Image: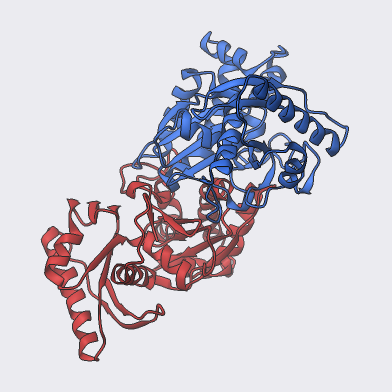
Chain colours: A blue, B red
Amino acid sequence: MKGALVNAAGGIVARSEVPTPSGEGVDAVIETVIRTVSDLIARGQNEGLDIPAAGVVVPGIVDDANGIAVFSANLGWRNLPLRTLLQSRLGVPVAFGHDVRTGGLAEARFGAARGVRDAVFLPIGTGIAAATLVGGDVVTGDGYAGELGHVVVEPDGDPCRCGGRGCLESVASARAIVRRYSERTGHHLVDAAQVAQRVVDGDPDARDVWDDAIHALADVLAPCVALLAPEIVVIGGGLGASGEVLLGALRHAIEARLPCQRRPRLVQAQLGIWAGCVGAAILGWETHTGTATARGGHVR
Amino acid sequence: MKGALVNAAGGIVARSEVPTPSGEGVDAVIETVIRTVSDLIARGQNEGLDIPAAGVVVPGIVDDANGIAVFSANLGWRNLPLRTLLQSRLGVPVAFGHDVRTGGLAEARFGAARGVRDAVFLPIGTGIAAATLVGGDVVTGDGYAGELGHVVVEPDGDPCRCGGRGCLESVASARAIVRRYSERTGHHLVDAAQVAQRVVDGDPDARDVWDDAIHALADVLAPCVALLAPEIVVIGGGLGASGEVLLGALRHAIEARLPCQRRPRLVQAQLGIWAGCVGAAILGWETHTGTATARGGHVR
C-alpha cells in the first residue's frame, strides 16, 4: 500500500509504503488505509503544509461516482462505501477512484501523456489493466473498463487467478514472464527485468517467453488502437521499465497488425509505481477546488 | 449514394438512392452529392416542409470538426474542404461527418442503442468499421477512430484492398464470406445471407467459412469490449441482418474470450442501411438548433 503527499504541481513531497494486511479481513485493510493517510497528513502538517483533501484509489471494480469499492478479489470487499467511511474518519474531504484509471490520469496530467487527449495507459506488473483517455476524460465503463489483462489469448492456456484460462495476464504480466521462464528452464529468476536482460544476452528460452508476451500484448492492444486511434500508448508497471527491449518489439508487433491505421506513439510511463498516488492526489485536489466533473462515466 | 429527408423524430419521410460515379473523378462525386441533396430539399419544399439544414457524411478519414474529407481510397479525394464547398452550393447550412460514426450516433438516438451511453456499433457489409460511444459522445480519434476492419487477424492471409494481408475485412466482411465460400466450393452465391442460410442448413463448408468470420470478429471485438466495457454492441450492415445465426455464435465467441469482464448485450442494428442518413440528419438538425457541441474529439 503506497501513500504520498503530493503538491499542486504533481510533485511527491513525502511518501509511505506499508504492507497491505492479507488474510485479516476487510477491516484490517481499512484501518491500514486510515493510518497511512493520517500519518501522511500529520507529516505534512508538521512541516507547516496545508493538506486540504485526500484521494484514495483501490483496485478491482470501482464505482467512482458513488465512492463505492464494488469488488476486489484480492482485498475481499464487496459494495463497500469506502469514500463515506474514510471521510468520516479522516477529517478531510476524501476523493475516491480506481488505481489504474487514476494512474492513467496522472500520466496524462504530469507524465508521459501530458497534453494528449486520446491515450491508452497500460501498466504491466503482477497484473495487467488499462486506463483509457478519450477527449481528455478517463473512460470508466460504470467501473468495469480496462480489464485487458483478462482477455483470453490462449484458449487452452494456463489457469488464471480470475477463473479463466490463457488470459493475457497469464502470458504477459511480469509475474507470468518470470514463471514461464522458470517452468521452461528450471532457473528461478526474481523479476521480469532479469528475463529482459537474458533476451538482450541472446538466451533463446528468454526470447521465446518474451516473444509470446509481446505477441499476446499486441493481439490485445491492436484492436483497441484501431477502435480509438489514440495518439499515444503508455506502458507502465514493472515491465514498462524494461525500455526498448519491450517497447521496440511491441511497437513492431502492433504495427504489423495495423497496416493502414494511425499508429500511436508507444512510450514508457514516467511516473512509475507512484502514478496511482499522484492520480489519487489529483482527485483529492479536484474535490478541494470543485473542479471535478461528474459527467456520466467519466472522471476528470 | 443514399439520401433521405428525416423529421425531428428520426423518421425518414423521403429517400433517394443513386449510383456513386466511379472513375470519373472527385468533381463528378461532388456534383452527384449536390444534385441528390438539392432534389431532396426540393421534394420536401414541394410538400410544404421546412428544410432548415442538411447533413452530409462520407467514408474514409474525416475531420469532423473542420468539415474536411481527409482521405478516401474509394472516392479519390484528399483534404477536400467538403462542408464549405457544399454549403456554398446548397443554400442551407450543411453539417458534415463520417458515415459509420454518424450511423452509430443514429443507432444511439433512435435505434438499437437508445438510452445507452457506452456502446460499440459495428456495421459489417462490403467493409467493416466501427463507431464508439463513450459517455454519450462519439469517439473520433481526430478522424482516425473505428478502423477495426483493417486489424490483421491472419498474418499470412488474403491481400486486402488497404494494402495489408489478412485484415478482418478479408475474413469477416459480407463480401469476404461470399468470396471465401465460392473459392472453397466453386458455388457462386450472391450475398452473405445465402451463406448464412447454408450454415443453418448444415453445409460444412458454409459452417467453416462462417466460423472463421465469427472467430476473427471475436478476436478483434473482445479486447475492445474489455477496454471500454460498453453496455451494448450493435451489429449492423448486411451481415447484421443475419440475426441469431450471426449474433448467437458471436456472443458465444466473445464471452469465451472474456471470462470475468462485464459482458455487453449483443444486438442487431435497427436502422439498417439508412443509419448513416438518419445520423447525417441529426448532425444537420444540431447545426440548425445550435445544439452540436464541438468538445475536442467528439461529435454529439
Looking at the image, residue B160 sits to the left or right of residue A83; the answer is left
Provide residue B174's location: percent of width, then percent of height.
Answer: 42, 61
Q: Nearer the viewer, residue B196 or B53?
A: B53
Which residue occupies 64% across, 57% down?
A: B252
Query: Is residue A104 in view from this perspective?
Result: yes
Q: Nearer the viewer, residue A186 or B200?
A: A186
Which residue occupies 72% across, 13% down?
A: A188
Provide residue A66's location: percent of width, then percent of height.
Answer: 67, 52
Count up the numbered dots: 0
The picture quadrant where one finds residue A122 is: top right
The picture quadrant where one finds residue B3 is: bottom left
Q: For the view shown, which residue lies furthest in the top direction?
A: A201
Looking at the image, residue B37 sits to the left or right of residue B128; the answer is left
Looking at the image, residue B5 sits to the left or right of residue A191; the answer is left
Q: For the view shown, which residue lies furthest in the right direction?
A: A24
Q: In the picture shown, does residue B242 fall above or below A124?
A: below
Q: Nearer the viewer, residue A91 or B185?
A: A91
Provide residue B258's location: percent of width, then percent of height.
Answer: 64, 48
Q: For the view shown, which residue lies furthest in the front direction?
A: A48
Q: In the picture shown, does residue A106 fall above or below A135?
A: above
Query: Is residue A223 in view from this perspective?
Result: no
Provide residue B88's location: percent of width, then percent of height.
Answer: 12, 66
Q: In the picture shown, does residue A161 fall above or below A294?
A: above
The quarter in which the C terminus of chain B is drawn is bottom left
The picture quadrant where one finds residue A29 is: top right
The quarter in which the N terminus of chain B is drawn is bottom left
